[in-house]
Image (cartoon, rainbow, N blue to C red):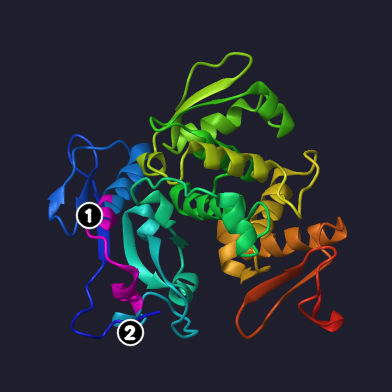
Amino acid sequence: MRLAGTQTAMRRVWTVELHPRAGGPRLFCIQCQAHTPPVDGPSARSAALTHLASHARTEALPAHLRTCQCHALGCSWHSRSRGCGGPVLLALTRQTGGRSWRLADTCAACAAATGGTAVVPETLLGARRPKPSGDILRRARHGLPPGSDERARVREMLTYLSAALPQFTSPAARLLALQCALRADTLGHVTVADGLLRTMRLRGRRELWLELAQAGWLETARSRPGPVTVRLLDATVLDQAPGRGARRRAAHWALHPTPLALSAAAPAALRLTALVLASHPFNTEDLDAVSRLCGHSPQQTVELLDRLVSARALVSWHQRQDTGEVLWQFPQQPSHCSADQDR
């Protein structure tokens, strides 16, 4: 991580606010000093993220020049301090109940300690990049296990959805949103096959589509039996890299997230928690971060982790009291901790 404080450090903080106005609310960009055209309530979230993403694209910086903006302000964005550290990431923070949104370069430690914050994957903001040739050989050469790219893609999208969707979005709706975001074409259109919905045990759950529609994240066609066709309203997910083929492979991996795949009959909350854990390659994460990805409170997350152990999907898990990190052990993997630390 490169800390701010030199003369060459550039400020990369962008903020938009939602202002009530006659004719409908408008977004006000602090940097542009201008209002956008009127937006309706459900689409305001997507419009805010799209505008912030445009700033990040047009004001791009090489990685070695990016600095932690939170550190530059004395780490005033979070109450607890664990010290700055880790790579500099783009962190999206929801403030004042969704009336203000901030996108900023923030180190991993500060991003994890800041409430209402999710890391925005660079793949959602950058221009499309061709997939490098010889990808399978590259993964083998660097010792990357099969599925590592799919795992990373799912983790990035779950992270983004934790900020893009309302906090109260149900686990089942989050699983649907993940599949839609990964399978959509460049115009935001996606048809979810009837067989896929049956596999996910979500066939006929019309209320889940209405939940995402009411959040302003997508719009659905009229209800009818068979496949469900929707159009995503969140413009930020339309310019993803790599291409659709790689994203579809990630969507398929998310249905069976080794090594923590659960039966489709398991509750959606448990399946989503298992997917979040399986998408992390190092079996460790901050409890608050896991809770945000799952859309649960930390107390609910603790209960779900215990249920995964009871179901023998996890051997054990424990939380470090000094850092708040959660560590877990999959079956047939070395333990992170001694037995007396396990829950």
Label 2 packing within 10 angstroms: few (<14), some (14-19), many (20+): few
> Horizontally, is 105 left or right of 36 in the view?
right
Whole-percent x and y of residue 32?
14, 55
Is residue 177 something that shows in the picture? no
> Horizontally, is 209 left or right of 23 in the view?
right
For residue 248, what is the image quadrant? top right
Residue bearing mark 1:
58
| Type of amino acid at the residue the image marks with label 1 | Thr
Up the image or down, 125 lies above or below 106; here it is above
The residue drawn where x is 59% and y is 29% is 207
Whole-percent x and y of residue 24?
23, 37
Whole-percent x and y of residue 18?
27, 50
The disc placed on residue 74 is 2
Up the image or down, 199 lies above or below 128; here it is above
Q: Earlier in the sequence, mark 1 or mark 2?
A: 1
Whole-percent x and y of residue 217?
44, 37
User: Residue 65 lies in magenta, yes or no?
Assistant: yes
Query: Which mark's residue is nearer the viewer, 1 or 2?
Result: 1
For residue 2, what is the image quadrant? bottom left
Along the line of sight, which residue is nearer the eye, 262 or 148? Answer: 148
The residue drawn where x is 65% and y is 51% is 147
| Type of amino acid at the residue the image marks with label 2 | Gly
Secondary structure found at label 1:
helix
